[in-house]
Image (cartoon, rainbow, N blue to C red):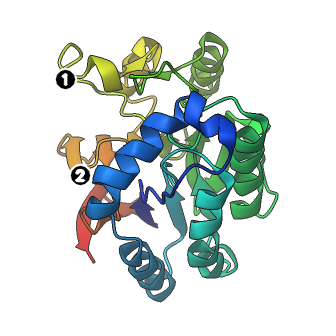
Amino acid sequence: MRIVHFSDPHAGGGAEDFFAYFDKRAVGVFNYKFRRQFRHDLTKLSRAVEYILDAKPDVAVCTGDLTSTGQPGEFEKVRPILAPLRDSGIPLLYLPGNHDCYVKRAKCVGAVREMTAYLSKDDYRFTDLPLQREYANVEFLLLNTSRPSNLLCSWGFVDKRDAKWVGNVCEEPKNTPRILLSHYPMIEEHPILRMRHRLFGQKRILELMNKKKIDLSLCGHVHKPYLKVDSTGRGECCAGSVSRNGSMVEIDYSPETDQFTFRTVTL
């Protein structure tokens, strides 16, 4: 079983309406204009799609932050790039990132909901999350941890109801590997230093990971890729930013050895 995992393209642009100057989008637009546009290259996302189409994995996973401020025009920048993958027959599992859920403006909420339905070919919708899917005898738990937060923070949250849902799912006998998909890392080694960017409410999920009820967490949010896994490949894998580092991760699971192996793909 093979998975290709990529994350955080961060398409951006200017303010798309008058109100964008008076909510959190103003911060994101400023960030994109003076910093992010010089660090992120969407042509690397195009190369990632080409690689996935050639590699033909069993599943492709995108753990969010398609955009910089969640505006409709930003989603439209990545739509034609991802369309060949979406239409290829390779299952594409997309979870929104905090930048995709940047503000509560109706047009922005509508844009992330439309993109979720589009990329899944209406297999699931934003409002369906959390949910389960199974491909190639591997179980995937899709968990949305991204919600609008305050002006200066990029917090994520595991809703109490979602944590309970994950716990109930993991009480069932596990006959296949179980992989959790979320934008935010579940493992945070520096919670104070990363206070502005951290996830809250994941304690129950970490317990399930420690008990091997969840074999692997796939995430983004942190732009530099990392692996925090044991000798069997169980733990957490962050894909990093595909457009900044030109990286994604190819993951293989062998039922014969019951192990995950990882290879960083440099575009």
First of labels 2, 1 by sequence position? 1
Q: Is residue 9 above or below residue 43?
A: above
- Say which residue label 2 marks: 225
Q: Write down the quadrant of residue 121 in the picture.
A: bottom right
Viewer-side residue, 118 vs 28: 28
Q: Quadrant of residue 261?
A: bottom left
The reply to whether the C-beta atoms of the residues labelled 2 and 1 are less than 8 Å apart is: no
Measuring from the top left, give residue 127's x and y in whole percent: 78, 35
What's the residue at 77%, 53% (across, down)?
A: 114
Number of labelled discs? 2
Q: Is residue 143 visible?
A: no
Mark 2: few/some/many CA within 10 Å (<14, 14-19, 20+):
many
Looking at the rendered structure, the kind of residue marked 2 is Pro
Left or right, 103 with reference to 223: right
Question: From the viewer's perspective, is residue 208 above or below residue 173?
Answer: above
| Residue that appears at 58% across and 28% down | 23
193 lies above or below 108: above
Q: Nearer the viewer, residue 51 or 57?
A: 51
Q: Residue at x 40, y 12 (%)?
A: 203
Whether residue 88 sits left or right of residue 256 in the image: it is right
Q: Which mark is residue 249?
A: none
Query: Percent x, y for residue 17?
Result: 68, 46
Q: Give the x, y percent position of residue 118.
A: 75, 62
Secondary element at image label 1: loop
User: Going by the image, does 233 lie left or right of 100?
Assistant: left
Disc 2/disc 1 C-alpha distance (Å) = 15 Å
Residue under pointer 1: 189
**Amino acid under disc 1:** Glu
